[in-house]
Image (spheres, rainbow, N blue to C red):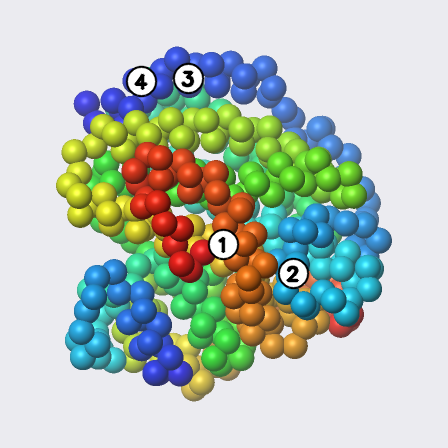
C-alpha cells in the first residue's frame, strides 16, 4: 500500500518534482504535493487497496499529513477502526 | 472596489432580470410534489439507461431488465446524493457572501440563489431519505488561505463546472419519457432553476477572469485546479458504494474499470463539452481535453 500511495502522490504533483524529495514524512498538503481536490481519489484508492470502506464523516486535514500518517490512519492495521458500517438500501441488499 | 464587485456591477441588469424570474416562478417545495408512499425500484427506470455509469462497460450485458432498473434506482439515489453534497458547499459559499459589503447590490439575487439551492436539496433529500439513502461523499474540506479574489473565482467557477455537468443529466432525463414521473419531475425542476444559475455563473466567471490582474502562472494554476475539480466531480458518478449495494463483487475494481472504459470516457467528454468549450473560449483552459477525462 505504501508504494501505491507514493506513486499516487508523485502522479499528482503540480510541477515536476524529484521523487527523492518525497519521503514518508513529507507534508503532503502543506508542501503542495496534494490538494484537497485529490482526496476523493486518494480515499477511493485506499479503500480499494484495503478492501473496506473508510468512514469519511470525521476526516480532517491532519489525517492526510504524510504517507506515514496515511498508513497509520488507513492502512491494514487501522482497518478495523475505520470501517464505516455502510448501510445497504433497505430491501435491496440481495445480489441481482 | 473588489474584482467581484466590479464584475457584479456589470451584471446588475442580468441579476435583476434573473431575480424577477426567480420571484415569478417561486415554488413551495412542500406542496409542489405529492410524494408516492413507496417506489418499486425494479419496476421503473429512475436514471436514463444510457446515463448509467456502467453503460457500455460490459457489466450490464448479462443483466435482465429489472436488474438494470434496480441499478438505475441506486444510481438516481447516488446522483441526488452528489447533488446534496455539492449544494451543501454551494449554500455555504453563497451564505458567506450574502451581505458582504462589496456585494450588497446583488444580495437580492444571492437570496434567490440560496433559496433555490435549498429547495433542490429538499427534493433530492426527500427522495433519498424516503426511498433509498444519502450516499456519502468522499470530498473532504481542508482549510485554504487564499486571497479573496482567487477564492471568489474558484468558488463561482467550481460551482459552474459542477452545475454544468449536473445539468447535462437533468436536461436529458427531464425529457426521457421512460423515467418514473418522480424522477422526471426532480430532474426537470432542477434544470429550470439551473438554467438561471448557469447564466449567472458564466457571467460572473467571465467577469472575474477578465477583470483580475493575475499573472500567467496564477492563471495556469487556476485552470489546473478547475480541471482537477472537474475530474474529482466526475469520479463521484462511479461510486463503489452503489455497486456494493447492487451486489457486485469488488466494487472498487468495478468503479475503476468503469472509469477507464472507452464508452464512459466518451460519455464524460460529451457531457462536459459545453462546460469545457466555455472555459476554453474564455482562456481559462487550454484547447486540449485533459487526458484523464
Of all chains, the one bearing label 3 is B
Residue A33 visible in the snapshot:
yes
Residue B14: mark: 3
The residues bearing labels 3 and 2 have C-alpha atoms spaced at a distance of: 41 Å
| Residue topped by disc 2 | B56
Residue A25 lies, in percent from the top left, at 22, 78
B252 relative to B178 in the view: left or right? left
In the depicted view, which residue is nearer to us: B219 or A43? B219
Of all chains, the one bearing label 4 is B
| Mark closest to the chain's N terminus, 1 or 2 | 2
| Mark closest to the chain's N terminus, 3 or 2 | 3
Residue B173 lies, in percent from the top left, at 67, 41
Q: Are marks 3 and 1 in contact (CB under 8 Å)?
A: no
| Residue topped by disc 1 | B234
In the depicted view, which residue is nearer to us: B63 or B3? B63
| Placement of the C terminus of chain A among the 4 image quadrants | bottom right
B100 relative to B236 in the view: left or right? left
Name the element at disc 1. Answer: helix
| Mark closest to the chain's N terminus, 3 or 1 | 3
- Residue furthest to the front in view is B288
Of all chains, the one bearing label 2 is B
Residue A32 lies, in percent from the top left, at 22, 62
- Does label 4 lie on the same chain as label 2? yes
Q: Are marks 3 and 2 in contact (CB under 8 Å)?
A: no
Amino acid at each position: 500500500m505504501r508504494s501505491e500511495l507514493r506513486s499516487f502522490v508523485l502522479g499528482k504533483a503540480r510541477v515536476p518534482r524529484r521523487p527523492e524529495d518525497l519521503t514518508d514524512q513529507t507534508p503532503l498538503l502543506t508542501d503542495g504535493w496534494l490538494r484537497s481536490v485529490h482526496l476523493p481519489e486518494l480515499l477511493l484508492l485506499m479503500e480499494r487497496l484495503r478492501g473496506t470502506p473508510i468512514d469519511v464523516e470525521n476526516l480532517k486535514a491532519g489525517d492526510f499529513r504524510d504517507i506515514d500518517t496515511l498508513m497509520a490512519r488507513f492502512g491494514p492495521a487501522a482497518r478495523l477502526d475505520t470501517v464505516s458500517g455502510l448501510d445497504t438500501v433497505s430491501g435491496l441488499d440481495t445480489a441481482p | 472596489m473588489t474584482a467581484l464587485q466590479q464584475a457584479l456591477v456589470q451584471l446588475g441588469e442580468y441579476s435583476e432580470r434573473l431575480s424577477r424570474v426567480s420571484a415569478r416562478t417561486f415554488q413551495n417545495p412542500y406542496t409542489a410534489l405529492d410524494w408516492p408512499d413507496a417506489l418499486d425500484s425494479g419496476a421503473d427506470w429512475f436514471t436514463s439507461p444510457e446515463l448509467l455509469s456502467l453503460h457500455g462497460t460490459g457489466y450490464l450485458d448479462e443483466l435482465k431488465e429489472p436488474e438494470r432498473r434496480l441499478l438505475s434506482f441506486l444510481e438516481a439515489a447516488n446522483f441526488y446524493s452528489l447533488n446534496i453534497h455539492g449544494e451543501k458547499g454551494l449554500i455555504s459559499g453563497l451564505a458567506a457572501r450574502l451581505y458582504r459589503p462589496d456585494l450588497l447590490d446583488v444580495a437580492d439575487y444571492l437570496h434567490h440563489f440560496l433559496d433555490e439551492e435549498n429547495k433542490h436539496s429538499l427534493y433530492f433529500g426527500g427522495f433519498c431519505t424516503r426511498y433509498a439513502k444519502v450516499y456519502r461523499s468522499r470530498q473532504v474540506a481542508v482549510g485554504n488561505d487564499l486571497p479573496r479574489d482567487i477564492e471568489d473565482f474558484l468558488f463561482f467557477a467550481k460551482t459552474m463546472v459542477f452545475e454544468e455537468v449536473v445539468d447535462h443529466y437533468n436536461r436529458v432525463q427531464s425529457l426521457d419519457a421512460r423515467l418514473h414521473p418522480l424522477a422526471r419531475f426532480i430532474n426537470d425542476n432542477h434544470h429550470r432553476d439551473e438554467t438561471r444559475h448557469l447564466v449567472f455563473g458564466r457571467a460572473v466567471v467571465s467577469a472575474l477572469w477578465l477583470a483580475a490582474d493575475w499573472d500567467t502562472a496564477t492563471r495556469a494554476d487556476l485552470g489546473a485546479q478547475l480541471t482537477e475539480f472537474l475530474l474529482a466531480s466526475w469520479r463521484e458518478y462511479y461510486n463503489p458504494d452503489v455497486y456494493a449495494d447492487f451486489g457486485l463483487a469488488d466494487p472498487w475494481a468495478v468503479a475503476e474499470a468503469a472509469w477507464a472504459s472507452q464508452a464512459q470516457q466518451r460519455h464524460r467528454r460529451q457531457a462536459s463539452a459545453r462546460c469545457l468549450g466555455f472555459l476554453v473560449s474564455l482562456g481559462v483552459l487550454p484547447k486540449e481535453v485533459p487526458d484523464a477525462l
